[in-house]
Amino acid sequence: METRRLQYFVTIVDCGTITRAAEILHIAQPALSQHVAALETEFGQQLLVRSRKGISTTAAGRSLYRYAQGILRLEESARHDIASDVDSPTGTVSIALAPYSTFSILMIPIVQMIRSRYPGILVRIVETLSVIHSQAIRLGQIDAGLIYDPGIVRGIRFERVSTEELCLVTPDGMTVDGATDDEVPLSALADLEFVMPRPEHTLRKRMESAMFDIGRELRVAVEIEHTYPLVDAVERGLGAAILPRKTAHALFEGTNRTIRRVIDPVIPVTLSLATAEDQELSRAAEVVIEVLREYTVQGRGSALLHGEGNRTT
């Protein structure tokens, strides 16, 4: 299998049309179509479905797309590793970031630290993916993740950063039956509508499970994948939010909101650094993960948030 053909295939899927992909790749459309046909012959499966609206992937095509991304990243990492100095690694390192977490606030200072130590490394931050973050790490699409710990996942190592209790965030003045100024029973949440990430997100799954356990249902009014639009959505009354305590206070500081601890039962969630257990990493990925570990697992992140981001060790 030629990695060049995999690159062509990924570009076609990303563009949605062979015409656009041919323009980007500077290849004639018939030649590009021949490369796709060669891949389909090699795998013995139809990979793309063509229509007037463009192209879509078959189940086999979606699988190849995921694995092709990992293969192409490994090839890129190998080239950079071979060409770069051990003490000055170069290359691209991808980090998955959990939406609705304090990692969204902490990440930019950490990237500043990475850049000050390793200016040859390009850091790619990704909040949303077509697959869940832990699967992307296992497939080699992502080097590491700062995510909600979903529990045991084969092939993934989780290093705990913090465990926090979930809180309800509502606009000031919003009435919540059964709530006090500081606490709210889980059962009262059944009467509210929420702004939440997609169903695959660990935070949402945790909440849906907790509501199911008490015979109630989580009502989601709006799905938002990224962290910062969440604040505006809650402020505008589109729905309430559920967040870990530190995340709630950090994101909604200075806004008109009420934060209440969810009780009966209390619901803890764990934020972790996730990496592959048995996957070969580029030198660039290794050093970036060490910085992530230093400023999350080992607890030095608060120093970055207080203006110490350029201090080296």
Image (cartoon, rainbow, N blue to C red):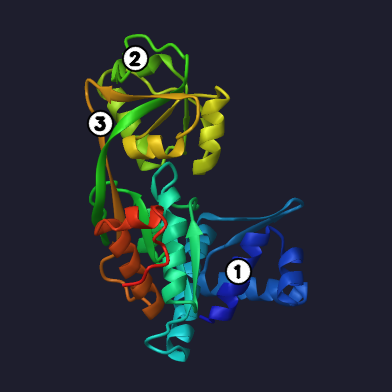
Tell me which residue sits at (48%, 32%) in the image: 254
Mark 2, Cα crowd under 10 Å, few <14 / some 14-19 / many 20+, is: some
Q: CA distance from mark 3 to mark 1?
A: 44 Å
Circle 3: element type: loop
Circle 2: element type: helix
Residue 94 image position (x, y, % from top left)? 45, 65
Mark 3, Cα crowd under 10 Å, few <14 / some 14-19 / many 20+, is: some
Instruction: Confirm whether residue 225 shows in the render.
Output: no
Callout in the foreground (3, 1): 3
Residue identified by numbered label 2: 188
Which amino acid, by three-letter code, is at mark 2? Ala
Residue identified by numbered label 3: 267
Residue identified by numbered label 1: 9
- N-terminal-most mark, 3 or 2: 2
76 sits to left or right of 182: right
Callout in the foreground (2, 1): 2
Residue 187 image position (x, y, % from top left)? 30, 16
